[in-house]
Each structure stands twice: as C-alpha cells, then as structure tokens.
Amino acid sequence: MAETNKDKKIAVVAVTLIILLSVITAYTLVYEEERYSSVQQDYEQLTNTYTSLLIEYNSLIDDYNNLVNQYNELNEEYTEFSETTEQYRQLAIDHLMELTYSKIREECQPNYNPWWGSYYYDILSVEYAASVCAHDLGRRYWPTIEDVYYEKKGTHLSHDAHDKIINLTGIIGISNYDNNVKKIEKILDFTSTYISYQYDLNEEFLFPVETLTFRSGDCDDFSILAATLLEEVGIESAIGFFTNQSEDNDHCMVLIRLSDLGNYGYYYYDNLTSYGLSDGKWIVLEPQETLGNQYNEDLIGKWEIIAVAEIPNE
C-alpha cells in the first residue's frame, strides 16, 4: 500500500513537471516567436533603410561624378581661355600703336573727291588698302608718321605689327608642311570664326592688327586681315572692290593667284592684267566664310569687280 502511494506521488510530480515544462516551453516558443517577429521586422526595416541609403549613395556618387566632369570641363575651358586670353593679349596693340594708325588714316587714307569721281576713288582706295596689308607685313610706307612712333618706343611700327602677324600664324596652326589649300582653309576658319562683322561709320580701313585687337570689322577689314595672312604664308593676294548693280551695293573681298583650290569650288578670273595684277588665274575668296562655302552665288558669284590691287612685295 505504501509503495502504491509513493508511486502515485511520483506520477503526480512527474505529470506536474511535464505540465510545467510544457507551459514553460509553450511560453518560451511564444516569446521567441514574438522576438523573432520583432527581429524580422527590424531586419526588414534595416534592409529598407540600407536600400534607401544605397540609392542615395549611388545618387551622390552620380552627382559627385557629374561635378568632377563639370570641374574637368570648366578647368579645360579655363585653361583654354587663359591660353587664348594670353595669346590675344600678345596680339593686341597698345595705345601708341592705335594713335599712330589713326594718324596714318587721317593723313593718308584717300577721301572721296567728286572731281575724281568714284572710279579714281576706288582705285586709290584699293591701292591704299593693299598698302595697309603690306605695312603690317613689315614694310614701311609712311615714314614721316612712323618716325614719331620710333622716337617714342624705339621700335618700328611696321615691325611690331609684323611680329603679331607672325605670332598669329602660329596660333592658327599653320605649318610649313601644309599645302596652299590647307593654309587657306585654316586662315578662313580663323577669320570667319574669331572675327565678327561690325558696321563701319566712316569707311575707315583698319590695319590687320587693329582688327585682331577689336576682333571685329566690316568687309574691307576682314579682307585686309585675310590678305595679309595669306601673303605671310606665301600665297600671292590682292584686295578687290566689287559691286552688285541690282542691289546698288558694294563689297570687298580677297583674290589669290592660284591655279585651284583642290576639291573646293570657287569663283575666279582667268586674267586681271587689265586691272594691274600679275598675269595668271585669280581666285575670289570671301574671308567671312569658310573654304567650303566659297562657291556660293548669293555670297560671291553675284559680285562684279570694280577695282583691285595686288599686295606690294616691297
């Protein structure tokens, strides 16, 4: 009987322990499930946060890369601008040069005289324009005026101007290995791109280095600059005055003594000896346009020559 009671007690204790363990286990499972669920939620939130931060990070990287590219572009532009600014600073004339050029124009540029008529005026003017080209190629034409410049500066105006013309051919990138067509192409690219058209109030002919300083001029200023550069690189050039009767308008362009322009189209005169030019074919160039646009009826073909003067060699 005593053994039976003892066994019952043991059974009760065992059942109680089992129930207790079951309750504890059940509670633990519930707790761990809740904890797991909470951790899972935290994990999902962290994953979402990470994803958002990753997106923001990639966006910032893109912004950074864009800023780096912009910086590099600006740095290149600044470097190019600085180099270009320094180049043009070297090309620009000073106040004394400008005053001397103004004095030459005042005393030497032909003025229209009704007694002569337009024919002689055009001839005198185009010859003066050719002399303006030759002057900035280092040839002295007005010593009385230029001697005053020499007394004040110790250098000749024509030589100072020629140094700038030589410098410009280097800036343009003309090489001794370039053929004539390539030289012409580079010069026209420069004049048509870096010189802007500006109306002239008094029909004054700017000297080439003046046009470089102002970076603007009208048709005669374009032509004087281009003809000077062409002569500098060994291409015989002339200044031509043209008219268009239907439009009652006049124009100035360049002519070059050359057999052809390679694959480029052009307008030309077979012979202009009756106008005082050297024998041979003379091609018309519009210095406000690139070489590829020289065979254009509206720009060049519509003009008829009035007067022309070859750039003097001495």
Image (cartoon, rainbow, N blue to C red):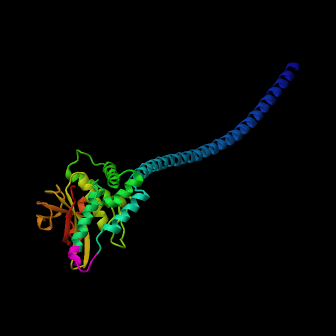
Query: In the rendered image, which quarter contains the C terminus?
Result: bottom left
Residue 59 in sight in this render:
yes
Q: Residue at x 38, y 56 (%)?
A: 149
Pinpoint residue 36: horizontal percent, then vertical percent.
68, 39
Query: Given the current orientation, which residue lies at the most extreme top position?
Result: 3
- Using the image as rendered, state which of residue 118 and residue 92 is in the foreground: 118
Residue 188 in sight in this render:
no
Pinpoint residue 301: horizontal percent, then vertical percent.
19, 69
Q: Residue at x 32, y 48 (%)?
A: 170
- Using the image as rendered, state which of residue 127 and residue 282 is in the foreground: 127
- Using the image as rendered, state which of residue 236 and residue 196 is in the foreground: 236
- Using the image as rendered, state which of residue 135 and residue 259 is in the foreground: 135
Query: In the rendered image, which quarter contains the N terminus?
Result: top right
Q: Is residue 84 left or right of residue 178?
A: right
Pinpoint residue 271: horizontal percent, then vertical percent.
11, 64
Which range is magenta? 112-120
In the picture, residue 306 is in which quadrant?
bottom left
